[in-house]
Image: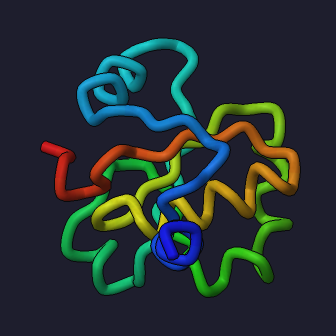
Amino acid sequence: MLDLFKSLFGASSSASGISAQELHALLKTKEKPVLLDVRQPDEHKQRNIPNSLLIPLGDLQRRMKELEKYKNKNIVVYCASGARSSSACRMLTEAGYSVRNLNGGMMMWH
């Protein structure tokens, strides 16, 4: 039952997490990661991390080609709470991308 919960809610991902505090620090360095928002356009419009790409989770598989130019870069994926981004991280990791999941998503971003 726990495995089912993890697969449904993205609790198991091979991507490591990154805290909002760590991301703030990383964004001040030369090696800024690519930021990927996998929420819906209306959520992104209300509040987002500046300079992030928007590809809703439901479109990610179909639009993954758009990310090919970032294959050699680190990508931080975020959503509202971390569940959708965990699923996105799993998909991206399987496709060979280097990704990290923003722990707690936008709820933890300040």
Residue 66 location in percent, x, y? 78, 64
In this orientation, which residue lies closer to the viewer: 47 or 83?
83
Residue 34 location in percent, x, y? 57, 41
Q: Please indicate whether residue 37 sits to the left or right of residue 96 in the image.
A: left
**Residue drawn 79% across the image and 68% down it:** 64
Q: Please indicate whether residue 60 sits to the left or right of residue 9 in the image.
A: right
Residue 33 location in percent, x, y? 55, 32
Work out whether 47 lies above or below 94. Answer: below
**Residue drawn 52% across the image and 26% down it:** 32
**Residue drawn 56% across the image and 77% down it:** 4
**Residue drawn 29% across the image and 27% down it:** 24
View extreme (front): residue: 1
Q: Please indicate whether residue 73 sits to the left or right of residue 80 in the image.
A: right
Q: Please indicate whether residue 21 sits to the left or right of residue 40 in the image.
A: left
Q: Quadrant of residue 59?
A: bottom right
View extreme (top): residue: 29
Residue 44 location in percent, x, y? 33, 72
